[in-house]
Amino acid sequence: MAHISAAIDSTRQQWGEAGVWHCGGGSTSGRALHDAVVRVSGALTARLGCRIGDRVGLLGLNTPEYQAAVLAAADAGAIVCPLNWRWSPAELAAALALVAPALVFVDTPCLALLQSVADGQHGCPRFTTVLLTPIDAVVWPAAETLGQQACFVSSCCLADLLTSPQQEQEHASGSGAVAAAAPTSQLQLLQPPDGAALICFTSGTTSAPKGAVLTHAALLHQSMAKLAVVGYCRGDTYLHVAPLCHIGGLSSALAALLAGAQQVFMPRYSAAEAVRLVSHHRVTALIAVPTMMEDMVAHLAAGAGQTDNRAQQRHGTATGSGCLPSVLRVLVGGGGMRPRLVPMSSNGGDAVGQGGACVGVPAPGVQVVIAVGGAPETGGSGRGSSCLVGGEAGPAVVGEVLTRGPHVMSRYWADPEQTQQALLPSGWLRTGDLGWLDTQGRLWLLGRAKDTVKSGGENVHAAEVEAALESHPAVAAAAVVGLPHKRLGEVSKGSH
């Protein structure tokens, strides 16, 4: 299997008529999910003219229909482009202009944001719009729900794509209901393993959005690495806490799909709702950013949740480098630069109490090295002032974290200059993160390379100063920046 949509076949085989995806008190069976993906994929190609390599945007919250649309678009050979519903209109318009989608799936909560940039005044291309209605919807929403926008070539809803043309005619004649169409039995799987599957957006250290392209093989490797590290299985129940518009949430969802695990969708995150769902569905696995983890732990500590259900949590992964020590002691830590190399590492044991934040040892098939003095030009020892050091070099050798392997992005979409800067000829990807490797091969992150203040010839890492300030009981949060200084060049300035 070398296509991200292929796993839906095993979901049908393993779960049949039993519910496997759960959201808002309802459940969708494995067979219904498979049939929905197949029908929507077929409708995209046969009725909406979707071609291999077309970009398909998705703007929505965490729902079963969102994930089904991801799999259907990928099955049809399209490149999936998750759009962040937290973006400003300007950010959304820039992303749409960059990838020029042929079609955009959007749900009702996010429709106003899409409409705000589709008026023909924001430089957006024209595209077909599909409203993400529930997979098991039995009534079409009113046609005017999507509205008339200059950038909308045409509009329909997901229920339209789940029916045959004959059923559409019957609906138009006044039936008002969506009957089950006779399902096509097979997936299309129109992209090869090295074909583009996903464009993940990141602004990185600039304000302009960049689209990191991941192939089917790369995305599958990321998901398989999660399986190897975290160990999801068919007996697990995975809770969607991380947004599906982020690579961490999407690759973890695919990992859960590959494992045959049940999935619980929470459209919007709240600590109270997350704890409730863990209890109600006996959730055993989730992935979240450190702030979410901290909120859930605090919610439990305050007695607002049922603390006895915490023991059910077999796999809890925190993405990023900012987990508090108290949270790290409770939950498994994991890290990686979004969106290009997650999951890069896994927690290697007791890693609390040393400098920086430990994100563990590299996942299977993932190479990690430290570049000192600049980016190396080759895959060997580097040239000039650049060099590569591995775990055997010992701790405290700080430099830029580089990674290489099948998990790495193939390029930035329509941006060869940024691609050349980030991807070295030898295959190493510059992450822009500062870190070091200890003698056990564990990676410790110190923050972004651009967050280093050069004061009096010394490199002062903003993250370390922030951690020192936040260790004071009177400081809840701190931020450190570098300010110009006549004698020292720069000095650190903190705010809390």
Image (cartoon, rainbow, N blue to C red):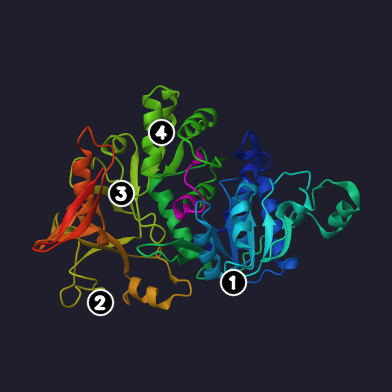
Marks 1 and 4, the one that precedes in the sequence: 1
Residue found 70% across the figure and 63% down from its top: 44
Question: Mark 3: which secondary structure?
Answer: loop
User: Which one is earlier in the sequence, the residue at label 4 or at label 2?
Assistant: 4
Q: Which residue is mark 2?
A: 377
At x 89% / y 53%, what residue is drawn?
170
Query: Which image quarter: residue 401?
Result: bottom left
Could you tell me which secondary element the residue under label 1 belongs to? loop
Q: Which residue is mark 1?
A: 53
The amino acid type, in three-letter code, at marker 1 is Gly
Q: Identify the amino acid type marked 3.
A: Ser
State yes or no: residue 101 in magenta: no
Quarter holding the C terminus? Answer: top left
Lower sequence index among marks 4 and 3: 4
Compared with residue 266, is residue 159 higher up or lower down, i.e. above or below?
A: below
Residue 489, how many percent across, how many down? Answer: 13, 64
In the image, residue 89 above or below residue 421: above
* Dot 2 crowding, Cα within 10 Å, few <14, some 14–19, many 20+: some
Mark 1–mark 4 Cα distance, whole angstroms, equals 40 Å
- Residue type, label 2: Glu
Q: Nearer the viewer, mark 4 or mark 2?
A: 4
Q: Which residue is mark 3?
A: 321
Q: Report crowding for label 1: few under 14, some 14 to 19, many 20 or more residues within 10 A (C-alpha).
A: some
Magenta residues? 236-251
- For this orientation, the residue located farthest to the front is 486
> Which numbered disc, 1 or 3, marks the residue that appears first in the sequence?
1
Is 494 situated left or right of 81 in this image? left
- Alpha-carbon span between mark 4 and mark 3: 18 Å
**In the displayed structure image, the side of residue 64 where residue 285 appears, left or right:** left
User: For mark 3, does the 10 Å Cα neighbourhood hold few (<14), some (14 to 19), or many (20 or more) residues?
Assistant: many
